[in-house]
Amino acid sequence: MSKKALLVIIFSLVLTNCVTIAFLVSAYTREAQKEKNDEIVAKIGNSRITRQEWLNELENRFGKTTLEEMINIQVVDELAKKNHIDVDEKTVEREIQMYKISSQSYGDSVFNDKELRKQIRYSILLEELLTKDVNISENELKKFYEENKHQYIMNDTYHLSHIVVDSKKEVQQIINELKDGSSFEGIAAERSKDQLTAKEGGDLGYVSEGSSDVPPEYIEQAKTMKVNEWSGPIPLERGYAIIFLHEKIKGEQLEFDEVKDQIRRQIALEQMEGNVSAKQLWDDIGVTWFYEK
């Protein structure tokens, strides 16, 4: 047998083996996927809910909205690159601080910094894209700033959690437990008398001086604290409290040059009719999706 013929036979055998292996792997993958889809995720008496039934229900309820949000993010990102629109970190950071100060939110509604940063950046890019062709004079921008200057005053703000109990003795017990490594959130959830925040680990969100959402004693105490520090006992009208300082934001008066781009977007968006959405930009880049079927 010639060397060439032998190589042909060997190549044919190798190709056959590769095809066979690929078929077996594919069959195994399909079988594994089927087993995963048939996996029981809940049992209710004699009834069962499979993973596939669960996923189908999630898609029916949230699939369209979730896919639309994913498309919107991609559309904004692509069009921003195409139009050479970018957002510097200083602008993102400033708007994050403004959001935190104005949100007064707590618990699950407090974004982690990474997620908040992504959302703020997306919002700014979307607004820039929607308003890029709108021209507003410098005089009009300055007029708006002077008339709404109070909106750009950032007071000292504190992200706090608290635990409220009946006696000073209980607070001291809690402080000892914290020193021994116990979790502030865990103790708040189990023992705080403030039921509204207890379920959120005692989280009060971001509060500023003069806020009616917390006792003034909290703010006075927070001024003297370091980040990631808990306080001593704080007397209240009913009982005692201990607070934990997550973050401290130093207040400032934002100058016109720092916020004029934000003002321009705000005025331009107010002039637009209808809902403001990234979906308005889909035709600019060309979008086709599953729900057009």
Image (cartoon, helix red, strand yellow):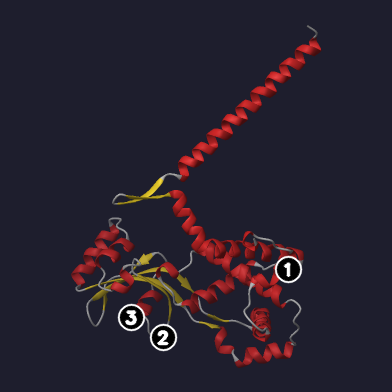
Give the mark, 1 or 2, whose residue is nearer the N terminus: 2
Assign a secondary structure to mark 2.
Answer: loop
Amino acid under disc 2: Gly
Q: CA distance from mark 1 to mark 2?
A: 48 Å
Assign a secondary structure to mark 3.
Answer: helix
* Mark carried by residue 214: none
Residue that appears at 66% across and 68% down: 88
Horizontal and vertical percent position of residue 132: 74, 76
Mark 1 lies on residue: 283
Relative height, residue 152 to residue 1 (above, below): below
- Residue 49 is left or right of residue 100, and the answer is left
Mark 3 lies on residue: 217
Mark 2 lies on residue: 210
Give the mark, 2 or 3, whose residue is nearer the N terminus: 2
247 or 96, nearer to the observer: 96
Quadrant of the rendered image containing residue 130: bottom right
186 or 58, nearer to the observer: 58
Residue that appears at 67% across and 66% down: 76
- Residue 288 is left or right of residue 196, and the answer is right
Amino acid under disc 1: Asp
From this viewpoint, is residue 143 visible?
yes
Quadrant of the rendered image containing residue 292: bottom right
Which corner quadrant holds the C terminus?
bottom right
Horizontal and vertical percent position of residue 181: 30, 55
Residue that appears at 67% across and 82% down: 260
Which corner quadrant holds the N terminus?
top right
